[in-house]
Amino acid sequence: MFKSEDYVHFWIDDDILHVVYKPNTVIDLKAAESIVRDRIRFQNGRPFLILCDLRQLKTVTKPARDYLAMQGSNMALAVALIVEKSYSGKISKIFINTSQPSVPTREFTEISKALDFLNSYLE
Amino acid sequence: MTMKTDAYRKRVLQILDFITEITLGNYAYQLDLKNHKDNLEEIVLSLNLMVEEIDTAVHQIDHERSSEVLENMILCLDLNLCITAFSSNFQRILNYDQKEVLGKSISIFISEQSSTYLEAEKGAQSLENREEDQYPFRLEFIHKSGYLWICYAYFHKAQTEQGSLYCLSAFKSIQRNQRIINYLKDRTDDRERYPSEYRSLLLQDKRKILRKLHAYIMANLNTSLPSMSILARTVGGSESKLKSMFKEAYGDTIFKYHKRKRLEKSSILLRDTTLPIGQIAENCGFVSFSHFTRSFKKEYGISPSKIRKF
């Protein structure tokens, strides 16, 4: 099960929705809206744990960060952000601390730890 | 090696100018980001993130003095996309002299990506009978110091007695705070009135409480909010202060804002999922189906079932 959009790739694996941003993507409000809309359509009413890989992302504008933190949390149970320590780590730190997503969201540099975090929300 | 050093120096100077703009209270610019991710680019990214956050913080704290205005720049271009006329704010925003602008190609003042887009638009406009509606597109102007003024624009072909020309209308929504403008105009005698350390701390506290309250509201879109007294105990602060601070920052009462956000969530779920309407109502904290339908219709002027049919 795989779906590709203009900015991200989506797929579901082991009950976790994987979202990977394409290289050098700039996310503005319009892009954020289309990503959230497509993700919610893709999930079709079923809430998911989300593993979101930001490592290749270029930047996300402030309106887009705030949108992703609010409306972007719809139908998400918890979100693990995969980042590098440098660069994308800066974006995730600002996102988590100032935009304050409304579902549990944490940043990780290792996918295995991110999966452990998400799996802790599985009953 | 020398070239790399020159580019590095140029970039550092650009960053220093950008920091000066921030210090002067200009938050409308962004530094362009390169595709490689070295330490310097990480600094650039961090500065861009920082200026956006400062802009939000300043205008959120001083809500009553900040207002959203649309900055609009107009440029007339000949058929080779050289500038023949420009609105006066072009010089103010991008800091060029008149002689540096007139007769010059627009490509000097916009990013490569924007330039490519404009050339393509020009090609499309030269096709006769192009009648489809135009949409605004993202345009990146380059300030004389190298950083970007990112806006949206329309590009039209216009007819004059002398022939055809192009008209580029660029606009950007910015927050304007009269108090900051006055302060920067007349610093000498106003210096002592600038927020004291004590006032800054008060504003910081206010912001923290507001954030906590907002996060609480957004985390509880699936249920109704507790009473004001419980809310006040949960996030700290007195009931009356909480009410007035929230209204000042978000332009709505706490409970109306919560309801509006629940309805926004429901409209997303109606539009983008096939969940039954009853379940959506429940997920968005409405106690009964009829209550949900009534509220939805009042807010959007259309019933939930009709939205779904679109």
Image (tube, rainbow, N blue to C red):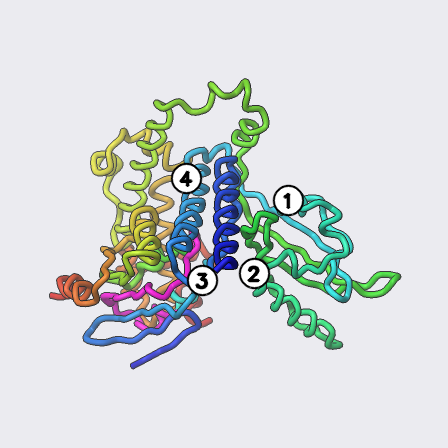
Task: Choose mark 3 or mark 1, whichever is in front.
Answer: 1
Identify the residue under disc 3: A26
Res. B214 visible in picture: yes
Name the chain under label 1. B
Disc 3/disc 1 C-alpha distance (Å): 26 Å
| First in sequence: mark 4 vs mark 1 | 4
Name the chain under label 4. B
Disc 3/disc 4 C-alpha distance (Å): 23 Å
Name the chain under label 2. B
> Do marks 3 and 2 share a chain?
no
Report x, y in % for residue A121: 15, 62
Task: Choose mark 3 or mark 4, whichever is in front.
Answer: 3
Disc 3/disc 2 C-alpha distance (Å): 12 Å
Boundaries of the magenta span: A38-63
Report x, y in % for residue A91: 35, 54
- SS type, badge 4: helix
